[in-house]
Amino acid sequence: MQVKQTMSRLQKKPIKLGLEKLLANPKKYFGNQRVGLICNQATVNHQFQHGADLFFEHPDINLTTLFGPQHGIRGDVQDNMIETGHTNDPQTELPIYSLYSETREPTEAMLSNIDALAFDLQDVGTRVYTFIYTMANAMKACARNGKKFFVLDRPNPINGNDVEGNILEPGHESFVGMFPIPMRHGMTIGELAKMFNEDFELHCDLEVVTMDNWSREDYADETDTPWVMPSPNMPTVDTAVVFPGAVYFEGTELSEGRGTTRPFEIIGASYINSKEYCDALTALKLDGVIFRPIGFMPTFQKEAGKTCGGAFIHVTDRNVFNPVITGITMAKVAFDLYPDNFEWKKTPYEYVYDRNPFDVIHGSTKLREAFEQGSSVKEIQDSWKPGEQEFHQKRKDFLLY
């Protein structure tokens, strides 16, 4: 009996992805139309077969064109490198147009050989992630050029209930924050597409191919959803859990753990005393997290080749863990403890040359100003509450599950 109970606990909830529903009956969706696909290495089914290959090989799909987001369609471009030019896919020999290059919105010429455009990328549940804006840009282009747009839905890997963080302010739009949504939005990519299309008036001919059996409380690793790194520094669901707060370190000169095996879970710098830093964080008694003193040496990017001190973020209870305020608290403690060393990241950041990268990430100047004015973490967190509550109400019209 004990063995059976153990095996039962190891079983994961089965999910049918939008990709798999579409492939079961593609003529229902596409008819005889020429199809384009926006995809990357995480566009897989439960057998880890790539969506581009599945579309190309399917006798009822006329796949003519591929589009790649940041990091490319096979995930071979590291970090925030800006892909240049367009190419052909070595597997299918179809043209690939990069949507993270000099062109971030499909042009009329790029869409000329398709009638419908399908989108299947794994989001990570955080406003600061370029894939959802690649989707928005493609929706704009489809609306302008009279093309049908399909979103093949996938789970929000860090659940679809929790919302946290400030709402991006008008005038602070960027390629990592195009619309007024909170840092942790608690929506699937299909739900976001509906919100973008209706509430933010993109007006494209949109159809979302929903999942079967996904529930809002599900984390990706509680289901049988296949996990492939959606970007090179997003290796695990654990990374996605901390990312809504740890991403703020991209706006500083501290290392966010790029160049280590646990990006975004490891935070630090060469000037940080690990014990001092973690003791200060521990004293604040944040929910669901333990900060372990750590030494590390990034192999590339910030602090490359230098011995750094810092913290490893151990999430002990993700049901009470608040990633956004945790990451902001970690940044503020470093700002307060090491005023002579702490620096904001230099521009540019994600195509933005005229704004502080920390402000770009936050979608406002207010957080940086709060640090500089000595505001408390509680004051910072309380300032978001009205926006969070308003967003909770707004998103109800677009939830599919």
Image (cartoon, rainbow, N blue to C red):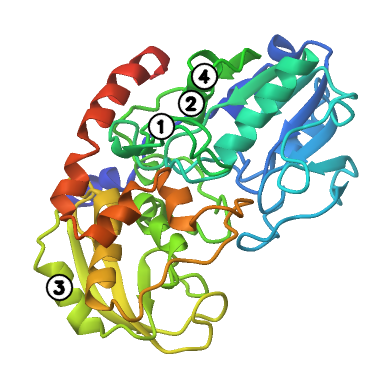
Q: Secondary structure at mark 2?
A: helix
Q: Which residue is mark 3?
A: 280
How far apart marks 4 and 1 lie (CA) works out to 11 Å
Q: Secondary structure at mark 1?
A: loop
Q: Secondary structure at mark 4?
A: loop
How far apart marks 1 and 3 lie (CA) works out to 31 Å
Crowd around label 1: few <14 · some 14–19 · many ≥20 (10 Å): many
> In this picture, is 143 found above or below 272?
above
Residue 181, which numbered label?
1
Q: Is residue 56 left or right of residue 153?
A: right
How far apart marks 4 and 3 lie (CA) works out to 42 Å
Quadrant where the C terminus is found in the figure: top left
Nearest to the observer: residue 371 or residue 38: 371
Toward which corner of the image does residue 156 lie, by quadrant?
top left
The disc labelled 3 sits on which kind of residue? Ala
> Residue 30, position in %: x, y?
75, 14
Q: Which residue is mark 4?
A: 200
> In this picture, is 300 found above or below 144?
below
Q: Residue at x 90, y 24 (%)?
A: 113
Q: Residue at x 9, y 61 (%)?
A: 285
The disc labelled 4 sits on which kind of residue? Phe
